[in-house]
Amino acid sequence: MTTLHDRMPVILTRENEDIWLDRSITDTDVLMSVLQPYSEDMYAYRAPELVGNVRNDGPECIEEVR
């Protein structure tokens, strides 16, 4: 998968959700260990230009541009 930019969102695996949400865990090494790139079942594609306007919120926003 191509990296789109340096602020990629984090997608936690089910196994890591509890670790990330546990406020008692303050060890940064443990917390950073759950921040791994996720690419399973994902692919990138060009979206329509209307995605760039926050007023657009319909199913056409997720259609792939060929």
Image (tube, helix red, strand yellow):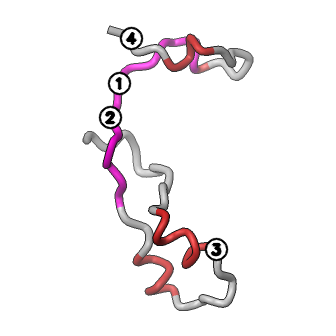
Q: Which residue is mark 3?
A: 21
Determine the residue positioned at 55% across, 69% down.
17
Amino acid type indicated by mark 2: Tyr
Depth check, mark 3 against mark 4: the one in front is 3
Helix, strand or loop status at disc 3:
helix
Determine the residue positioned at 38% across, 20% down.
46
User: What separation in Å lies between label 3 and label 4 (alpha carbons)?
Assistant: 36 Å
| Tag shown at residue 65 | 4
Residue 57 placement (x, y as % from top left): 69, 19
Determine the residue positioned at 51% across, 20% down.
62
Q: Which residue is mark 1?
A: 45
Q: Is residue 28 left or right of residue 36?
A: right
Residue 4 placement (x, y as % from top left): 37, 39
Depth check, mark 4 against mark 2: the one in front is 2
Of pointers 4 and 2, the one earlier in the residue sequence? 2
Marks 4 and 1 close (CB-CB < 8 Å): yes
Highlighted magenta segment, given as a residue range: 37-51
